[in-house]
Amino acid sequence: MWRSEDDAATDISNTAVNEAIAQAVELAGDPTSLGRLPTDLAAVLAQLAIAAPGTCALRSLGRVAQDIHLVDDDRLRTAAARVSWGFRSLFNVPEVTAMLRGRGEHEDVYWRQVLDYCLRGCLQAVLDEYAHVLREWLGIIDRDVETIARELARSMYEALTLRAPNYRVDDIRADGRTGITVEPKSIRARFALRFGSQAAEETGELQRASQVRGAFNSPFWPFILATTSIGQEGLDFHLYCHAVVHWNLPANPVDLEQREGRVHRYKGHAIRKNVAMANAPAAFKRFDRDPWEAMFDAARVGRDRTAGDLVPYLLLQGSAPLGC
């Protein structure tokens, strides 16, 4: 089973997934038992081909590996399957399930709602961008296909399966007759995460800062990261963040520059927005190429030669401001 190195293997022996796998194996051996074709079969297959998480992951991995035809490679298929398993975990989170089901107006089965959500949210474009920036961030640009696929899948899986910690709080109540009572309570927080090496109160599980940072540096949750001055130096938050809100202003201007430097970095989020706005057509010239590499190449070729080599990788003006 696809899992992170420090996770226990997921037991699916008594789940609907195991039943679906068994049914798929049975039907593969005897396709005649499928019965009459559904009227929406063509439409559903088209949606699966365009937006199914595993299929999108397979295409993205093939593009960053510089050969889309590598989708036939078992190493890429295994990596894509691990990413899709991470999406399964994400879409089974109660909060996400409630969000997709909404108020109950839709009668579709849940997997159809997930597929529609991935289609409308352009999951392919999300994973193409994520794979591009993640490969460079991990420093595996010149590695072999197996290493690239394995490391990208591992990081994506960990971002998709970030666990919710339990926080302990004291419920303090004042009673005019008996004084003050303190009742300890536990709060499970999916979106609110403490940044730092903290242990979950009840389980003792370590909520490592690197896990939170990796998830924040992804297109998935958490979308807001609150930190003290510990986060103003030596950390990269630019992959999917382009804005810093200061709760206070440091007395030293160097510290202020350090804070802004967390998001204003090489191929940062704001940079990519400006590159895409000006060079989007370049991404569609070849379906087998990394679209973000094509857009950056187009931005580099079309830049003002007097601007220097910082354009378009560190400096590129556009609708997205390069600041805080």
Image (tube, rainbow, N blue to C red):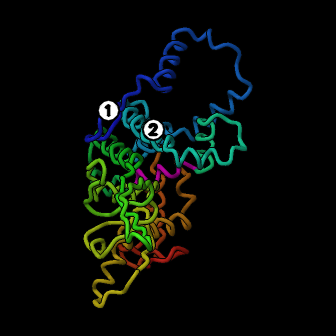
Give the farthest residue toward the bottom. 251
- Disc 2, disc 1: CB below 8 Å? no
| Vertical relation: 254 (above or below) 264 | below
Q: Residue at x 59, y 35 (%)?
A: 111
Amino acid type, mark 1: Ala
Q: Quadrant of residue 268?
A: bottom left
**Helix, strand or loop at mark 2:** helix
Location of residue 64 in the rendering, given as x and y in whole percent from the top left corner:
40, 47
Q: Crowding near pointer 2: few (<14 within 10 Å), some, many (20+)?
A: many
Location of residue 288 in the rendering, given as x and y in whole percent from the top left corner:
48, 44
Mark 2 and mark 1: span between their CA atoms? 16 Å
**Helix, strand or loop at mark 1:** loop
Residues in magenta? 122-132
| Vertical relation: 186 (above or below) 112 | below
Q: Nearer the viewer, mark 2 or mark 1?
A: 1
The C terminus lies in quadrant: bottom left
Amino acid type, mark 2: Ser
